[in-house]
Image (spheres, helix red, strand yellow):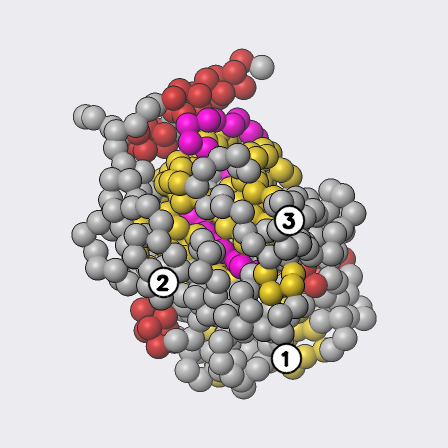
Amino acid sequence: MKLSRFSLLAAACAGIVGIAPAVRGAVIINELVYDDGGTDDREFVELYNNGVADEAIGGWTLGGFDGTTTNPSATVTAGTVLAPGGYYVLGNAGVKNVNQTLAANFLENDGETVELKNGATVVDSIAYETNKGSTGATGYGAAQVAQIGPGFVGNHQANDTAVAVNTGTTSTVARWADGRDTNNNGRDFGVRASTPGTTNNPLGTMTAYQPPNVSGLSVGTNIPNYAFSFVGPRVIDPTVVTAENPNAISAAPGTGKAIVAWDSSGGGNGASTFESYAPGAPKSFEIKAYLDTVNSPLSTNASAVAFRGSEFTFYGIGSTDSLANATNISGQTGFAPRTPPALDTDAGFTGVFWVYEKVGVSTVGGSDVSEHLYLVDANDGGDASTGGNTPLDWVVLQDVDLSATDSGWYDLSIAIDGLGNGVASFNGTPYVFTTSPDLIGAFSVGYRENTQDGADGTPAWIRPATFTVVPEPASLSLVGLVGLALARRRRR
C-alpha cells in the first residue's frame, strides 16, 4: 500500500507506547459555558462520573467566586445519583440536555473559580481566565490550587448564533477527554464543541490532521467539524476580494481555493477541530499557510490618532484562545512590555504552535517592522498567578525572521510522539524539539488584528489566517528526520 507523505509523517512517530489517560476520583467538572455572545442565557456546567460505581450527588453544591465577589451557588437536587460514565447538566433553560435549571448569569464572565463541593470538601474546581490574575477570594487555599494548577488562562466566549447553536459548532471550555483529570486546568481543558450531556469527543480522536481539499466547494462554505468562538472557517477564492477575503493574493497551490479563519467584524477569533488528539498517541498536522510579509503601514484610529499596528496568526496542537489574545514575543507590538522573558501578554494558547507575529511601522515612513514566525511551546497556558506559574512559561523553540522573505504559500507542520519528542517544519526546514509527554489537544487556529485605517475598521492590507491542504507529492525529508531524532533519543 502506498502511503502519502502525511501518512508517513504520522507513522514516523508510531510504535511509541501510549500513556494511559490520567483519571482522578469520581465526579468532576467536565464542560462549561460561562459567557456567550448575548445575554448569557446558555450558561451551563456539566458534571461527569469517571468512576466505576454510582455516586450520590444530591445535596452537593456548585458555585464560584473571584477576587472580589462570592457568587451564587446551586444545590444538586436531593436524591440525584450519577451512574458511571453518566453526565449531569446544571444550566439555563434553553441548554440542550439540561438536568437542573439555573438562572441566567449564574457564572461571571471573567476571572472566576467554579467549585463542586460535597459539604465542605472541594471535589473539583476550574479557574478560568487566569490571565487576569488571581481568581481567589478570602479563604482560597491549597484545596482549590490542588485541583486547578495554573487554571485555564485563555479568554472564552461561546458563539450563540442560530447556525452555531443548531449545528453544534458553538464552543465551550471542556476536557479533551471525558473524565481525564490531571489537576491542571491548562492541560485538561480546551476550546471544544458544545456537547452538554454527551461525550466531549463526538467524532472520536485522531492522530493526524490535514485540511480538507476545498477546490470543489463554493466560496463562503463553512468548513465542517470545527468549533469556533465567533466565525467558523470558510472557503475563499484567494484571488478575489470578498467579505471573507480582505485582499487578493495568489491562488492556493494545487487547490486554487483556501480556508480562512477570521472574524471580519474585527478583533480575535479562534477555531478548533471537533476531533482531539488521542492521549498517549502520536499527533501531527500539516498545512500550507499564506504568510504576508509586506511591511504594514502606520495604523490610525477613527480620530486619526496614529498607532503601531500588528497581526497575530496561530496554528498548532493544543487549545486556541477564543479571542486569540495578542502576543508580544518580539517586544515590538506596541503593547506595554513585560519583564523578559515574560513578553507574551495574555494569549491563552496551550500546547505547541507556530505563531506569526507581524508588527507594522511606528512612524510615518518608518522601517522598524517586525515579521517573525515563532515555534512556541505554550505549555499549559502561561501567566496564571493562581498556581504560582509566574512568569509566563511560554518557551520560544525557534525564531524564523521573515523580514527578507517574500509573501507566499508555505508548508507548516508539527509532529509529536507520545513521549514529547517532536519535529516542526517551515517550508521543508525541520526543527527538532521536546515538549511535555502525553500532550493532548486539537488542531487549533487563531487570528487577531490590532490594526485600523482611519474610520475604516477593516484595513484592506491585513491577511487573516489562511491555509489549505498540502498538495501531493512532496519530499519525505521531514519524515526521515522524525525517525532519526527518535532513534537518537532511544540510544541515549
Rendering quarter of residue 154 = bottom right
Query: Would residue 300 be found to the left or right of residue 49 on screen?
Result: right
- Mark 3 touching mark 1, by CB under 8 A? no
The amino acid beneath tag 1 is: Ser
Residue at (53% x, 58% y) in the render = 448
Number of other residues with Cα within 10 Å of mark 2, as a class: few under 14, some 14 to 19, many 20 or more = many
What separation in Å lies between label 2 and label 3 (alpha carbons)?
A: 30 Å
Q: Secondary structure at mark 1?
A: strand
Residue underneath mark 1: 73
Residue underneath mark 3: 366
Query: Would residue 110 be found to the left or right of residue 386 on screen?
Result: left
Q: Compare residues 384 and 372 and report the one nearer the observer.
A: 372
Residue at (45% x, 53% y) in the render = 463
Task: Indicate which label's residue lies in the foreground, 2 or 3.
Answer: 3
Q: Is residue 246 above or below residue 403?
A: below
Q: Residue furthest top?
A: 491
Q: Is residue 137 above or below residue 100?
A: above
Q: Compare residues 321 and 335 and report the one nearer the observer.
A: 335
Q: Position of residue 231 (x, y in %)?
A: 41, 65
Residue 438 in the magenta stretch? The answer is: yes
Q: Is residue 245 above or below residue 207?
A: below
Name the disc covering residue 244, or none: 2
What separation in Å lies between label 1 and label 2 (alpha carbons)?
A: 43 Å
Q: Secondary structure at mark 3?
A: loop
Query: Which residues make up the magenta segment?
Result: 426-450
Task: Indicate which label's residue lies in the foreground, 3 or 1.
Answer: 3
Q: Position of residue 90 (x, y in %)?
A: 50, 76
